[in-house]
Image (spheres, rainbow, N blue to C red):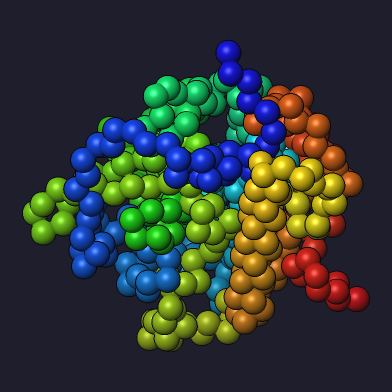
Amino acid sequence: MYKWVGTRRRLCLFSMIAFFISGCASVRHAVPPDLLSSARVFGMQDVRAFSGMPSDSFKEDFIKLLEQEKKEQSSFFDFNNSQTLYALAISGGAAEGAYGAGLLSGWSESGVRPVFKVVTGISTGAIIAPIAFLGNEYDYKLKEFYTKYSTRDIVRIRIPFINSFANTRPLERLIEKYFDAELMKQIAAEYAKGCRLYIGTTNLDAQRLVIWDMGKIASIGDDKALKLFRKVILASASIPIAFPPVYLNVEANDKTYDEMHVDGGITRQVFFLHDVLQGFDKALKEKGMDASKLKYAIYVIRNGYVDPIYKEVPDRLSAIAERAVDTIINAQGIGDLYQLYVFTKYGKGDFNLAYIPATHVSKAKELFDPAEMRELYDLGFKEASGGYPWRKRPPGMEESK
């Protein structure tokens, strides 16, 4: 049996090999560029938005969220009294998501984990986010998912190579197990209370991040909605070249097309909604609400490192390529943290960051190594249960005193 060795970065090397491999490709009917914004999945309206393109439906929905909280005067967010709306953003990181799973569970153990009004997730964060969205009573699912399974429980090598090197049917089965109709019903219930869950995928044709309103999808409640819910999670976690893309059938101008979706981490390692909520302040004012009174705190869990990790690189093509890809991914992740930080400071919000400490040295012997994942889970749990020292600025900036 083929033995997986290394980390998630090693899979990115396949992209460099792909140019030298040919195979049979299926015929596609991709969405024309002028119809991208109007294409709908299964006829579902307003369940997604393209990052970088203002979305009136997302903006109106977010205002509806605030109006609902104002009316109900909830204990954790009262618009009139300028209390705090809590948001959680969970990054990519493949097996390193075990750290975020442990941190969330340890945070629950500490007794100070907030109730999050908005949760976003991407890549491995797309698996964590729906479970975290439902609160600490579901922490056991996080521990199980990120400590019980190995590489063969996630992917299998496929031959011949067509559009990927691996088959993700094992991962699909796990998603079907953990994200069932009952869990979707619970997410729909939280959506009805005014909480929001968003997952990001990459539309590879458009080279854009697509943000999915998972609560709205869950609220539809039928089998098609459940199928889409699972496919979005799978797509967000599907590393291109290594894992096959996820195709979504869409409708536009009464015609059927297909969209190719892959790992959301290709376009963003972590995200919020600021670039689809352009004009939000003006819209709030039109509703008679003052945006300056809106206080919020964003907690960002970076399932990876932020500090440069020294490693002597052998003078081999594969080693150099792997290290280069690793560096690119880390740099992208740090850039995304800075973007979130600037957005938060612009809106006078509270920025909070957690990440794997540089002192942790990975001993992983395969892509999803249960022993390494348990160690990461335990590390996150220990740090958070004792009171996590949330960083108030991205790496490279001096902490305020």
Residue at the top extreme of this rendering? 1
Residue at the left extreme of this rendering? 254
Q: Quadrant of residue 154?
A: top right
Whether residue 88 is visible here, answered yes or no, is no
**Residue in view at x 47 percent, y 72 percent:** 275
Q: Is residue 336 above or below residue 397?
A: above
Q: Quadrant of residue 233?
A: top left
**Residue in view at x 51 percent, y 54 percent:** 266
Residue 4 versus residue 313: which sits nearer the camera? 313
Q: Position of residue 301 (x, y in %)?
A: 68, 53
Q: Quadrant of residue 367?
A: top right
Using residue 335 as the reference point, say whether residue 51 is left or right of it: left
Q: Is residue 271 above or below residue 284?
A: above
Using residue 126 as the reference point, say whether residue 295 is left or right of it: right
Whether residue 73 is visible here, answered yes or no, is yes
Residue 204 versus residue 105: which sits nearer the camera? 204
Number of labelled discs? 0
Q: Position of residue 101 (x, y in %)?
A: 68, 39
Q: Position of residue 341 (x, y in %)?
A: 67, 72
Using residue 339 as the reference point, say whether residue 170 is left or right of it: left
**Residue in view at x 81 percent, y 32 percent:** 363
Quarter placement of the N terminus: top right
Q: Position of residue 193 (x, y in %)?
A: 45, 53
Residue 276 versus residue 257: which sits nearer the camera? 257
**Residue in view at x 91 percent, y 76 percent:** 401
